[in-house]
Amino acid sequence: MNYNTKLLDRKMISPDILVVSLDKPEQYEFSAGQFCFLNLQDSGIQDERGLRRHLSIASPPLEKELLFATKISGSAFKQTLLKMPLGAIMTIEPPLGTFTLPEETANPVIFLAGGIGITPFRSMVQHVATTHTNHTVTLFYSNRVPGEAVFLDELQSIADTHENISLVPTMTRVDSSTTTWSGLTGRLNASMIQEGCKEWRDAVYFIAGPPKMSDSMKEMLVEMDIQPERIRVEKFVGY
């Protein structure tokens, strides 16, 4: 079953990252971390991939709107999403995916996010914060420069006000940034994880980001003797 919805708001929050808000259909239920397919109406921009794409839902289940963030490309889907007027109608499909918080809360949860891979983690962190689950979460968030770090200020505010949520951001190309950065620099590595979460050996790991980043993070965790069954991966491909 598909659901009709409409575009409520759209904002470019970095040179190539678009955030859109959609009206949440009645009875649309999902778990934090899931994704869904969006189907856009043809506005004259076409290509062989069509106007249907899956995007992670960045909003938590109890939020009144559905929030999505995506990296803009030249594809017909992305260009249509970028140019369609506010109020435009589209359809969304039922939520999919098992990249969701574990029911068990005894072990800590570690999120490893690269770039736009932050979207499912934004949903999960907001869910933990607003529903007061017993999860202990440490979010490691890697970007090239602060200006590309989607939701960074919001996530930092949540971490500052919730003892069970920690945020460890790092920038890989801070020398090219016009914004001053006093935090960690360089790619996510084992030392950052071990210092950022003292219970890293017992944690359940979630990885989301570009394919190369996701693969390297998984390899790193295996080298740290993290068992494969405690590693979940969601690869983000921009198209």
Image: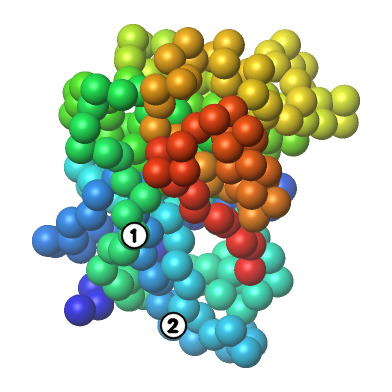
Q: Nearer the viewer, mark 1 or mark 2?
A: 1
Q: Is residue 49 above or below residue 62?
A: below
Q: Which residue is mark 1?
A: 97
Q: CA distance from mark 1 to mark 2?
A: 25 Å
Image quarter in which the N terminus is found: bottom left
Quarter of the image for residue 70 reads bottom right
Q: In this view of the protein, can residue 223 be seen by the observer?
A: yes
Query: Callout 2: 10 Å neighbours few (<14), some, many (20+)?
Result: some
Image-based side of 1 in relation to 82, left or right: left
- On the image, the x and y values in percent for residue 132 come to 20, 23
Q: Residue at x 48, y 11 (%)?
A: 198
Q: Is residue 45 above or below residue 199?
A: below
- On the image, the x and y values in percent for residue 231 come to 45, 41
What kind of element bears circle 1? Answer: loop
Q: Residue furthest left?
A: 27
Q: Nearer the viewer, residue 92 or 142?
A: 142
Image quarter in which the C terminus is found: bottom right
Q: Residue at x 36, y 75 (%)?
A: 90
- On the image, the x and y values in percent for residue 57 come to 38, 53
What kind of element bears circle 2? Answer: loop
Q: Earlier in the sequence, mark 1 or mark 2?
A: 2
Q: Residue at x 66, y 17 (%)?
A: 191
- On the image, the x and y values in percent for residue 209 come to 59, 47
Query: Callout 1: 10 Å neighbours few (<14), some, many (20+)?
Result: few
Q: Which residue is mark 2?
A: 41
Q: Amino acid at mark 1?
A: Gly
Q: Amino acid at mark 2?
A: Gln
Q: In this view of the protein, can residue 146 be seen by the observer?
A: no
Q: Nearer the viewer, residue 234 or 90?
A: 234
Image-based side of 93 in relation to 37, left or right: left
